[in-house]
Image (spheres, helix red, strand yellow):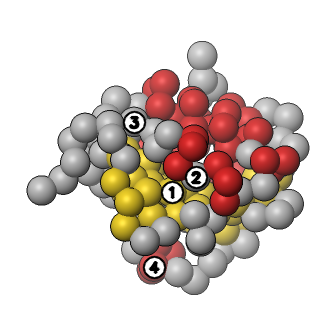
Amino acid sequence: MTNRRKEPTRKGNVVRVERGLVPDMEWASAFDSRQMGLMLTIRRELARHTAGLAEKVNTKGLYFGYRNGRGFDALYIHVQKKNLVISVRLSRAHVGHLRAEGYKVNARPCHQYRAGWLTGWEVPHDDREPLKAVRWMLAALEHDAPVKLAKPPSAIT
């Protein structure tokens, strides 16, 4: 039976909630606080714009994972020293759009890549326009399969 409440459950190094965000006290000590400003902005915006968002945090693998309200994985964000490395459930056809917006994308051959996701998207911790990246993440959370959007997602308000 899944935990439909907001209380976190822990299994080894993974802490999750089925609705909302994992409380900071459950994961913050595992991450370098100097690298978390962008991640905190992303978390806040994802929760604000996604009904039924579910979050999991792996405190050993140093990543955050997100599901939409229908239970489909949509996004994994790995926290690294210089940037966030993101796997997002969008078609790899969007690599050109992300590069045109100034992001580096170097595909990573992982489970998500084999499932058709766009992987290896790098967002530097000092990104001056975090909402530009968040809009792509929100687009992935809206769908239940890797999709090619008709056009890049619009700005967040």
Q: Which element carries disc 2, helix, strand or loop?
A: loop
Q: Are marks 4 and 3 in contact (CB under 8 Å)?
A: no
Up/down of 118 relative to 55, above or below: below
Q: Give the numbered dot on residue 20.
A: 3
Q: Which element carries disc 3, helix, strand or loop?
A: loop
Q: Which one is nearer the viewer's eye here, 146 or 15? A: 15
Residue drawn at x 57%, y 43% is 25
Q: Which residue is mark 4?
A: 111
Q: Position of residue 11 (x, y in %)?
A: 37, 67
Q: Which residue is mark 2?
A: 27
Q: Earlier in the sequence, mark 4 or mark 3?
A: 3
Q: Position of residue 19 (x, y in %)?
A: 32, 38
Q: Which one is nearer the viewer's eye here, 115 or 58? A: 58
Q: CA distance from mark 2 to mark 1?
A: 7 Å
Q: Position of residue 2 (x, y in %)?
A: 18, 53
Crowd band around label 2 with a 10 angstrom C-alpha radius: few (<14), some (14–19), many (20+)? some
Q: Quadrant of the C terminus?
A: top right
Q: Report the amino acid beneath label 1.
A: Val
Q: Are marks 4 and 1 in contact (CB under 8 Å)?
A: no
Q: Give the numbered dot on residue 57.
A: 1
Which of labels 2 and 3 is toward the front?
Answer: 2
Which of labels 4 and 3 is toward the front?
Answer: 3
Q: Earlier in the sequence, mark 2 or mark 3?
A: 3
